[in-house]
Amino acid sequence: IHAPMAKVWQAIQARRNSSANREEMSYKKNEAVVHERFPALPRVGDIDCTYEEDEQQTANRIEYHMVNSNHFREFEGCYQLRPAADGVSTVLALTSTVDPGIRIPFWQSIARAAAEKSVRETLQEIAVLAGDR
């Protein structure tokens, strides 16, 4: 992302309230509680998920894990930031593990494809929020 690490960090924080489907419920001592609604997912319908984001600023990472959900069995991951070689930009890695709680044929392939799409969209949104056009 063509932005300094501090701006990317702030963009991740700003993303908590960047959509009508996402809201930061609380923030205390580097821990945010976020509620997110994933509307009209194929074969599942609407999913509500509340998760915590734990900011570990000295490690340049934000870990998140599910608190509760009406469908998900698992929802967790991590944003990891590091300076890019140019000394100005930021390399942002996002890992995510999602179990949608459905058991239909090929559910793992379907969930993986959906998670990969979501990660790409999340990284693009963070880049825009950080000022990278």
Image (cartoon, rainbow, N blue to C red):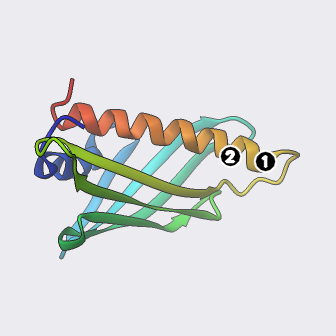
Would you place residue 128 above or below residue 10 in this image? above
Mark 1 lies on residue: 107
Residue in view at x 61 percent, y 39 percent: 114
Tell which of 113 and 31 is nearer to you. 113
Kind of residue sitting beneath label 2: Ala
Q: Position of residue 49 (x, y in %)?
A: 50, 57
Q: Is residue 117 left or right of residue 58?
A: right
Q: Quadrant of the C terminus?
A: top left
Residue in view at x 83 percent, y 45 percent: 106
Mark 2 lies on residue: 111
Callout 1 environment at 10 Å: few (<14), some (14 to 19), or many (20+)? some
Callout 2 environment at 10 Å: few (<14), some (14 to 19), or many (20+)? some
Tell which of 73 and 7 is nearer to you. 7
The reply to whether the C-beta atoms of the residues labelled 2 and 1 are less than 8 Å apart is yes
Q: Residue furthest bottom?
A: 29
Kind of residue sitting beneath label 1: Trp
Residue in view at x 70 percent, y 35 percent: 42
Q: Is residue 86 left or right of residue 53?
A: left
Tell which of 43 and 88 is nearer to you. 88
Residue in view at x 15 percent, y 31 percent: 131
Disc 2 is placed on an element classified as helix
